[in-house]
Amino acid sequence: MSESRVGFQLGTIGALSLSVVSSVSIVICNKALMSSLGFHFATTLTSWHLLVTFCSLHIALKMKFFEHKSFERQAVLGFGILNGISIGLLNLSLGFNSVGFYQMTKLAIIPCTVFLETVFFKKKFSRSIQSSLAVLLIGVGIATVTDLQLNALGSFLSFLAVVTTCVAQIMTNTIQKKYKVSSTQLLYQSSPYQAATLLISGPFLDNLLTNQNVFAFKYTTQVVIFIVLSCLISVSVNFSTFLVIGKTSPVTYQVLGHLKTCLVLAFGYILLHDPFSWRNIMGILIALVGMIIYSYYCTREGQKKATEAAPLNQVKGDESDPLVNLESGEKGST
């Protein structure tokens, strides 16, 4: 195995680990902020997250931790606004649907992403990958889905949230490879547009969902401390999101997201003493089995693809591309 491939795999493992740790940490922090301290303004808080992320990256740029690389302004503008809209729609979906239906909305993102990539990017997912995804989704469904109360407006918002989220995550992977930009460079250029979208719409959406005004909220010292902590953790969350999608694929990122959901449930029970049942435990175990199977087949098929490509690269005298995707049959341009 070449040093570049070993380095890429270690980088991928690091990105996945960073994503899990930071996401679980921010969920626990935000849960304390919203449940214990009564700060329920999720969309506005997300806009602050993105604003702090941009400021942090701007400082890092000035300190020459990474290089600025410009590309099509229309692409980054559309991408940033779409990401902001998808976050707002997910929050609206939670506000107008039951928790069970919202969890079903999140589960629908994986099959929707697979469908879009199959139709528009001609990607091929093996039966082994499809089966492991099915096991994972069944496990997460058992662990998280409770009631399924349907309503027309909530269903429409959920549909829009799923589609925009899938397209935004596919665009993340596509833009990084098309313009040869790193996750840091893409996040730096897109975060201002995401933040602006949510800064404008956030207070209105939060008021619609909570009947409270974010500007009239009583900001105690404890609330401010948790908000600052949440914003600081969000820098790692946003960076790791772009990093994972860039190094793997949108589907792998969604699989990781469901693993984080299971971990949040487990940590919530252990640290916050949330209600827990045998159904939760069984669902988490099934989801973990699906995650392990998915990881195994992705690794095996990725190695098989790299082995098949090696003789061709030797003939051309080129080095193998270190950005080998983990999905079976994935093209380098997607």
Image: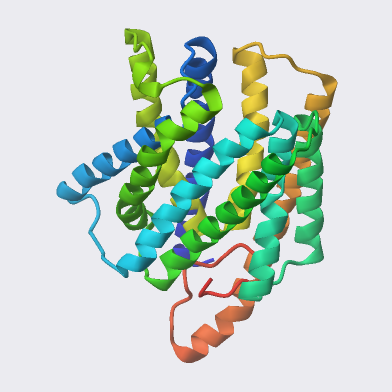
Q: Is residue 316 above or below residue 252?
A: below
Residue drawn at (70%, 64%) of the image? 115
Depth check, front residue: 239 or 108: 108
Q: Is residue 41 above or below residue 216?
A: below
- Give the percent coordinates (x, y) of residue 37: 47, 11
Depth check, front residue: 36 or 122: 36
Color scheme of the displayed model? rainbow
Quadrant of the image occupied by residue 141: top right
Q: Identify the image quadrant of the N terminus.
A: bottom right
Residue drawn at (68%, 42%) of the image? 153
Q: Is residue 210 above or below residue 172?
A: above
Residue drawn at (36%, 30%) of the image? 231
- Give the percent coordinates (x, y) of residue 324: 53, 67
Is 50 situated left or right of 64 in this image? right
Q: In the current view of this chain or complex, which residue is farthest to the bottom?
A: 315
Is 117 situated left or right of 142 in this image? left
